[in-house]
Amino acid sequence: MNKIKGVGIGLRHRHFKEFIENKPDVPWLEVHTENFFSKDSTSSKYLANIRQNYEISAHCVGMSLGSATLSCPVREQHLQKIKQTIAWLQPAMVSDHLSWSASDGVHYLPDLLPIPYTEEAFEVVTQNINHVQDVLQRQLLVENPSSYLAFVDSTMLEWDFLANLSKITGCGLLLDVNNIFVSAHNHGFDALAYLESIPVEAVKEIHLAGYSIDTIEGQEIYIDTHGQKVYDGVWQLYEKAIERFGAVPTLIEWDTDVPELSVLLDEKRKADAIIVKVLNKQIA
């Protein structure tokens, strides 16, 4: 049973002191796992203190679940460090992205790169997810990406790829509503159709964040930057997501130009209000 409920926020270094001293009313926090590989680091000691009062979700960025060949699975050294961190942190959930960042076990890129939605890629990701879950001995949540270009070789829709991954591997899905909104705008697909195609029982967590707007060759592109408040269109899509998936644990994610904690708490309250609105509507 998932111990995490309600709306949490991403824990960032500038807010450590406030969570230790003031213990703001937040039901859970999410951290980037790779920032806490050393249990003896100053950051890990702060987190261990905070962990005494808050449930934690561990969000990874370096598994490279979409590594390009079956001969190059998830890097074992990295996976073992994640396992060691999970052992002392005891997070309620562990997640990573539907992306790749490693090539041939030699080259590692500081970005979450997209994969083509093909049968070959599905085989690779399936093997890697199964391996991760075997090593960690727990369910992995896989997050849908934001995207700006589409592979001409893709033979599956993104939402079908994710739904099938969950069915075949037993992984959960971390549904990033902002990423769906961003990609729907950039590619012209129906965000509501995306939600309707995702199996309800697979969704274990939702992310909300802000995006930026850029113009490239005369076309307005939404960029997933995690550096702004959640846009109105994303809030509206989030309400539809709660109507479909229920009161799934939701995270306010803010990674760049991190503001005062009060700004994140205001965003949290907006998400709380939407959950209450939907639940009241369903009861009425």
Image: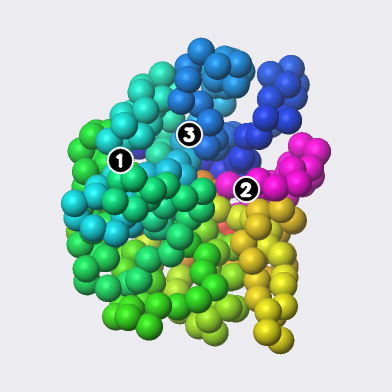
**103 vs 247, nearest the viewer:** 103
Indicate how the structure is coloured in the image.
Answer: rainbow
As measured in the structure, the alpha-carbon distance from the residue carrying label 1 to the one carrying label 2 is 26 Å
Left/right of residue 42 with respect to residue 40 in the rendered view: right
Q: Is residue 141 visible?
A: no
Of badges 1 and 3, nearer the viewer stands 1
Q: Which residue is mark 3?
A: 33
Residue type at the position of mark 3: Thr
| Magenta stretch bounds | 251-277
Residue pictured at 35% horizontal, 34% vertical: 78
Picture quarter containing residue 2?
top left
Mark toward the start of the polypeptide (2 vs 3) = 3
Tag 1, which secondary structure?
A: loop
Q: Quadrant of the C terminus?
A: bottom right
Q: Residue 5 appears at what percent x and percent y? A: 51, 40
Q: Which residue is mark 1?
A: 75
Left/right of residue 203 with respect to residue 121 in the rendered view: right
Q: Quadrant of the N terminus?
A: top left
Q: Which residue is mark 2?
A: 253
Q: Residue 185 appears at what percent x and percent y? A: 60, 78
Q: Is residue 264 visible?
A: yes
Residue 7 vertical position relative to residue 154 in the rendered view, above or below: above
